[in-house]
Amino acid sequence: MSTSKGLHNKVVLFRIRGLTFVSFGLLAAIGAVVTVWLTMARQVQIGLPLSRYLLPLFLSCPLLAVLGSRLLALLIDWRTLRRDPRAALLSTAFAWQGGFVLTVGGVAFVGALLGVEPLLLLDTFALALPLGHAIGRLGCHTYGCCHGKPTRGRVAIVYTNPEAKAVRVSRLGGVALHPAQLYAVGTNLLVFAVLDQLAGWTLPAGLIAASYLMLHSACRFVVERFRGVTAPRWRGLSVYQLIAVGLFVGGALLAAYTGLARAATPVRLGGVAELAPALGLVVGRYGALLLVTFVTIFFAFGVHGRRVGSLARS
């Protein structure tokens, strides 16, 4: 059992001029950069014309990710938004699935608009996302959000930092909890490894993206059973499990489409071990865009007011 000593109690990076910078923002930004970096490297490797869509795609995706996750969080907590709009808008709640859906829509739209096959773009994105997501979930671990239910098992963590969300919001300081965020880290790494193996096969475009939707949704559905965060429920299922079911069905439909659509381009994307030359090229040629991604995500998720959990300076 992990108690007060550990990454999970390292909420604040530093404070300066009435602003608080939290470790969640740093890890979320690193995860976003890893996702974009790996995605671009795969696209370079298979010869996609980055210059045709790079700026609109990779400048919009970080913004879409932030906007979508924020909107879904507000929608889920609509009662607070209706009762106290100012408090809801100044909170720092985010729901990852909203950012995912909006970003996927942006990727598909830009690809279709500029004549790059959307399904192939989604495949390259799906192969990178689980690793970036795993890093981001480490940020949840440090911040105390997305925490687990109380447990008597030996595998547990205890939040003692009063600024951790599990303590200041859920009032679970000193209580042994399932390390649900680490379960999410592990399942994302598992999905990343499985998809990396699939990338070594020649498959119809879109099938890897479909596999990601089904695998990730199934894992999220299971991990949700260990999460202790209060969320609206319907027939015993949390709203996040319902979203996971919807994404799983979407993945199954996409898999069926790629199997039936003869126009789906067969492609071999290759495993991550084959990406070394392309990774270096992306850093050298598009390092500024990676920096923009880092700064956008870091400031969106990492900057709070004087108090952790608020956007207000006072």
Image: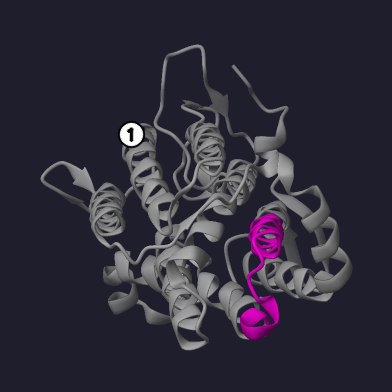
Q: Is residue 56 above or below residue 62?
A: below
Q: Is residue 94 above or below residue 269?
A: below
- Residue closer to the observer: 251 or 66: 251
Q: Name the residue under label 1.
A: 222
| Magenta residues, start to end | 32-54
Q: In which quarter of the image is residue 3?
A: top right
Is 291 positioned to the left or the right of 69 in the image? right
Q: Based on the picture, tell me whether residue 310 belongs to the magenta stretch.
A: no
Question: Which quarter of the rendered picture does the N terminus lie within?
Answer: top right
Is 11 positioned to the left or the right of 203 in the image? right
Q: In this view, does 265 lie above or below 220?
A: below
Q: Which secondary structure, mark 1? A: helix
Q: Based on the picture, tell me whether residue 47 belongs to the magenta stretch.
A: yes
Residue flagged by tag 1: what amino acid is it? Val
Residue at the top extreme of this rendering? 154
Residue at the left extreme of this rendering? 235
x and y percentages locating residue 194 in the rendered image: 50, 35
